[in-house]
Structure formats: structure tokens, C-alpha cells
Amino acid sequence: MVLPCEIAANKIVPAIKANLAKKLKKQGMKQKEIAKLLGVTNAAVSQYLSGKRASKIIGKYKTERNSEICNICKQCMK
């Protein structure tokens, strides 16, 4: 079973960063500046811009089950 936080870390956050990188590049920001701003390598930004990395969010997830798992994780973190 894949936990919701794993999905967020591995799929959703990179997809958001890819989208931001593309928008910042269109606004004229340099690739190196984008990398620093997003906290990733210059190579990662290059892959975001070319669509080789995090091009789309994959999968649908049941929110009810996810919230149960999130609550368990929160309890463990206390």
C-alpha cells in the first residue's frame, strides 16, 4: 500500500514544481534561478521544462481512506 504522503512527495509536489518551473521560465527567469527558488538541481529544472520529469499527476485516490491513514501517521508523530 502506498501512503498518501508518499504519493504527495513522489507525484504531486514534483508536478507542482514542474508547473511552476514552466511558468517562471515563460516569465524570463533563468533555469539556475528557478532551481534555487524551487530547491532542486538545475538538471531537475531542465527535466521539468522538457517534460521528462513530473509531467502529470497519475492516479485517483480515495480521500476517506487517505484521511484515516493520515490520522494514524499524525498520532505516531506525537
Image (cartoon, rainbow, N blue to C red):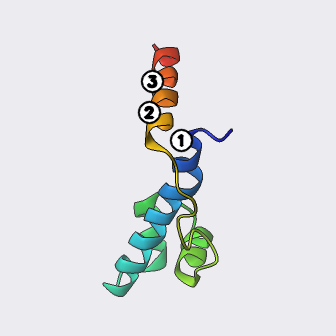
> Which residue in the structure is indicated by mark 3?
71
Residue 55 occupies quadrant: bottom right
**Tag 3 secondary structure:** helix
Structural distance between the alpha carbons of marks 1 and 3:
11 Å
Q: Amino acid at mark 1?
A: Pro
**Neighbours of disc 3 within 10 Å: few (<14), some (14-19), many (20+):** few
Please give the count of numbered marks on the rendered protein.
3
Q: Is residue 13 above or below residue 27?
A: above
Q: Is residue 59 above or below residue 65?
A: below
Residue 67: mark: 2
Q: Amino acid at mark 2?
A: Ser
Residue for point 56% across, 57% down: 11
Structural distance between the alpha carbons of marks 1 and 2:
8 Å
**Tag 2 secondary structure:** helix
Residue for point 49% across, 45% down: 62
Q: Residue furthest right?
A: 1
Residue for point 52% across, 49% down: 61
Q: Position of residue 24 (x, y in %)?
A: 36, 77
The numbered mark, 1 or 2, whose residue comes first in the sequence reads 1
Q: Nearer the viewer, residue 22 or 2?
A: 2
Say which of marks 1 and 2 sits in front.
2
Residue 1 occupies quadrant: top right
Q: Is residue 64 above or below residue 40?
A: above
Seen in the image, is 11 located left or right of residue 27?
Answer: right
Q: Position of residue 27 (x, y in %)?
A: 31, 84
> Which residue in the structure is indicated by mark 1?
4
**Neighbours of disc 2 within 10 Å: few (<14), some (14-19), many (20+):** few
Cβ–Cβ under 8 Å for marks 2 and 3: yes
